[in-house]
Image (cartoon, rainbow, N blue to C red):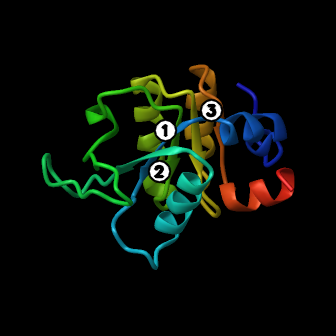
């Protein structure tokens, strides 16, 4: 198995493909405008993306609606296809969501700035699901979409 490095999990072509994706499940998104997950989800909407709030601390049907979109307590509860699973969790808790993204057939996984799990990267990419780690869509858009 190849060793992951910073460059492989921030591959520009992979980042560009994910930024072009339409449906983003945002793990950890709640109705808290001061939180980064909220501001990034808002940016995704402004860019024409469909966001899907996923907040695992809630049980069905109590997952909150955020930014006008129905929330779900788990990725597996989303009744339609997801292009990218964007994970706002600490590194030690994020890997399970990469695994769940693979299970639901997501087309990509994105771990936010500061979130790194090399073993999860290896599992997801070995399963054919591209993954980006330690990156922010807002920053990447500003670099590539001027």
Residue assigned mark 3 = 122
Q: Quick check: marks 2 and 1 in contact, CB under 8 Å?
A: yes
In this orientation, which residue lies closer to the viewer: 74 or 2?
74
Residue 61, position as x, y percentages in the image: 13, 48
**Total tally of numbered discs in the picture:** 3
Q: x%, y% of residue 136? A: 67, 58
| Residue 30 locus on image (x, y percent) | 34, 64
- In which quadrant of the rendered image does the C terminus lie? bottom right
**Which residue is disc 2 drawn over?**
94
Dot 3 or dot 2, earlier in sequence: 2
Q: Nearer the viewer, mark 3 or mark 1?
A: 1
Mark 1 lies on a secondary structure that is: helix
Say which of 92 and 82 sits in front: 82
Checking the image for residue 98, the label placed there is: 1
Question: Is residue 121 among what the camera can see?
Answer: yes
Which residue reaches farthest bottom? 34
Crowd tier of the residue under label 1, counting other residues whose Cα lies within 10 Å: few below 14, some 14–19, many 20 or above: many
Q: CA distance from mark 3 to mark 2?
A: 13 Å
Disc number for residue 124: none
């Amino acid at each position: 198995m190849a060793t992951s490095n910073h460059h492989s999990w921030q591959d520009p072509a992979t980042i560009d493909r994910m930024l072009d994706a339409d449906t983003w499940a945002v793990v950890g998104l709640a109705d808290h405008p001061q939180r980064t997950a909220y501001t990034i989800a808002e940016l995704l909407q402004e860019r024409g993306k469909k966001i899907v709030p996923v907040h695992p601390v809630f049980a069905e049907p109590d997952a909150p609606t955020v930014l006008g979109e129905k929330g779900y307590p788990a990725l597996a509860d989303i009744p339609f296809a997801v292009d990218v699973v964007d994970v706002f969790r600490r590194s030690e808790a994020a890997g399970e969501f990469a695994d769940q993204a693979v299970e639901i057939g997501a087309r990509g996984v994105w771990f936010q700035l500061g979130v790194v799990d090399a073993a999860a990267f290896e599992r997801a990419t070995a399963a054919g699901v591209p993954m980006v780690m330690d990156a922010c869509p807002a920053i990447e858009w500003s670099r590539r979409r001027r």
